[in-house]
Amino acid sequence: MAGGTTALLVVEDDPFQREAVCAYLSGQGFAVDGVGDGAAFRAALRSGLPDAALLDVGLPGAEDGVALARWLRAQSPTVGIIMLTAAGELVDRVAGLESGADDYITKPFEPRELLARLRAVMRRAATPAHGPAAPGPLPPGAVRIGGAVLHLKSGILVTAEGREDRLTDGEFSLLRLLVEHPGRALHRDWLLERISGEEEPEAFDRAIDLRIMRLRRKVERVPGRPMAIRTVRGVGYLFDPEAG
């Protein structure tokens, strides 16, 4: 960041979309650079990392947006990363978030929505600079999950910012199953069977992934780098009680 201006890098292979996004964000006061593929992305970073990057998932060449997000996250834990995807498959969005991205937005999108998502990511990136406060003792019937605290009797989740969030029945059931089996990898099919019919009838393969994504945004300090609700590849998900 130079002179108080947030530096953004937009990686989008469609010239029209790239120019439209760059023009809009430049008009919002950001210093924006746009490139069309992984090679140009790496060339643009020779002068330093941006404050945030918008990465199209489907890019030409050897590296797609997921690979670039993974590489960029390895370089910096604080750079904001938003995936831009036209894919309807949830697996692509999940892969993007698990690569280290902070958020995703599906094309086509409203410019104002992109701006709101970008500002939210930048706020989250700035928050850990002084480190999280030391956790205090928990009241009876409460359990710490990442940066949040779940009150098992009321079903209320208190976020790291102190905001109360009343979970849906499906979200609470899934979170309760995870905390009741700490440190154990729970199979996705088993989780789906246990909570099916408690919220909306989501009897399809990615229902659990969608709920996990929503919960991570509520409990993880950095949703794009989940620590409390971890993915166990080929199995499902695991709650790590030591990740708070």
Image (spheres, rainbow, N blue to C red):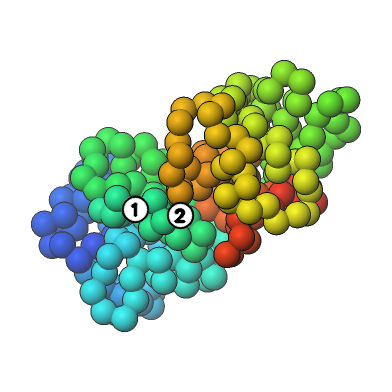
- The percent position of residue 118, horizontal first and vertical second, equals 39, 45
- The percent position of residue 214, horizontal first and vertical second, equals 52, 39
Figure check: 74 above or below 226: below
Q: Residue at x 22, y 53 (%)?
A: 22
Q: Which residue is mark 2?
A: 94
Query: The residue under label 1 is which amino acid type?
Result: Glu
Q: Quadrant of residue 144?
A: top right
Q: Quadrant of residue 95?
A: bottom left
Q: Is 132 positioned to the left or the right of 201 in the image?
A: right
- Circle number at residue 29: none
Query: Which of the pair 17/184 is nearer the observer?
Result: 184
Figure check: 55 above or below 182: below
- The percent position of residue 138, horizontal first and vertical second, equals 85, 30
Q: Residue at x 45, y 48 (%)?
A: 206
Q: Is 110 positioned to the left or the right of 15 in the image?
A: right
Figure check: 231 above or below 208: below
Query: The residue under label 2 is which amino acid type?
Result: Val
Disc 2 element: helix
- The percent position of residue 208, horizontal first and vertical second, equals 53, 44
Q: Is 128 positioned to the left or the right of 17 in the image?
A: right
| Circle 2 Cα neighbour tier, 10 Å, few/some/many (<14 / 14–19 / ≥20) | some
Disc 1 element: loop
Of mark 1 and mark 2, the one earlier in the sequence is: 1
Q: Residue at x 53, y 29 (%)?
A: 197
Q: Which residue is mark 1?
A: 89
Is residue 8 visible in the rendered image? The answer is no
